[in-house]
Image (cartoon, helix red, strand yellow):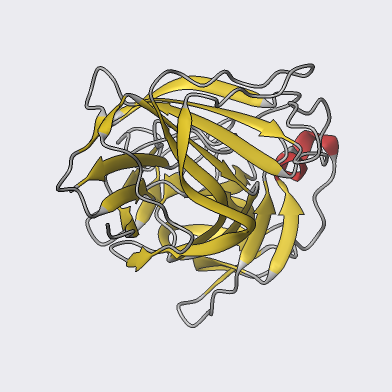
Amino acid sequence: MRNLLKIIATFTMLGFFSNANAEGYCNDGIIAEEDANGVITFKGSQEGANCSFAPDEYTVKIYKMALCTTAPTRPTTTDTYDVSSCVDIINSPDGQDVNLAAGSEMTLSDATRPADGTYPYGYILMANTFGIKAKKQFTNTMKTYQDGTAGNYCWTKDATAYTSDSNVEDGGWTDPTPLAQCGGAGGTAGTYTEILDAFDTDEYITGPISVLGGDITADLITDANGLVVTATQTADRLFAIQTFIPIEPVVIAPSSTEFTVSFGVNQAASLWYYEQPVGSSEYQVYAIGSGPFSTYMSAN
């Protein structure tokens, strides 16, 4: 039997990651809008809002991926997850880096063909780090937080930060920001690595969230004990369960030779920013961080 697994990045699905809004403010037509050329226009006050879009590159590290005959049990702060009903499709103790870009396709290693059958559930164990490379054009004036350069473009810089650092009210932002740059069309994007250590303030679990292909839950845990963390900057793994039913369970047939996992990255990047001063058309940008994405699994 052939053991073949492909990861395909797409533009078609929404998901759950980060404290970005999963509805996608870039396409609501009221607060912000992204045109057919990918140019974003902000139309009002952005207080409490985020704008998510597709990055140029998006890197994740996968340790395990599995299909399950019954629903896995999510971890808690006192009990680890139960995946006894699951069969591994990928098992990489050291993890394997996957660089996703819109329309890209690649084959993963350490893949095993699961037994024939119908699988209504699946899970992924991955690192809680996301490498984001993006350059985005705006019709508004975008300024590097707080006293940096300004222009109609913003791009990522080579840097690393925690998601919990995105709370501007805590006064943790550095002036000027080391994570992003705004200016003219000639800017060159680097890779910003975001460590997802909280989904929102003091929130380390999320879901179920409805996505194309089912529902998804996600939990921030540690590899050492498999328990949900209770503080920022302590997680080192993300445990995500996807329920495929009632949409479409994964069916492994005797003729199946290819297992495909499509990652929707249409909203996998989001801005850390705010409008300043109030009522102006200038926007302070601190970072282009991780936004939501989801998965869709199928066998052929």
Compare residues 192 and 1 and report the one nearer the observer: 1
Residue sticking out furthest to the bottom: 186
Residue 83 sits above or below residue 177 on the image: above
Residue 209 sits above or below residue 168 on the image: above
Quarter of the picture containing the N terminus is bottom left
Tell me which residue sits at (41%, 52%) in the image. 112
The location of residue 93, given as percent across then percent down, is: 65, 55
Question: For residue 242, what is the image quadrant?
Answer: top left
Q: Is residue 184 left or right of residue 193?
A: left
The location of residue 91, given as percent across then percent down, is: 54, 51
Residue sticking out furthest to the front: 1
How many numbered markers are drawn? 0
The location of residue 85, given as percent across then percent down, is: 48, 24
Tell me which residue sits at (33%, 44%) in the image. 33
Q: Is residue 43 left or right of residue 151?
A: left
Residue sticking out furthest to the left: 255
Compare residues 158 and 120 and report the one nearer the observer: 120
Tell me which residue sits at (66%, 22%) in the image. 75
Residue 80 sits above or below residue 18 on the image: above
Q: Is residue 156 left or right of residue 297?
A: right
Question: For residue 214, what is the image quadrant?
Answer: top left
Compare residues 249 and 87 and report the one nearer the observer: 87
The location of residue 237, given as percent across then percent down, is: 68, 42
Residue 69 seen: yes
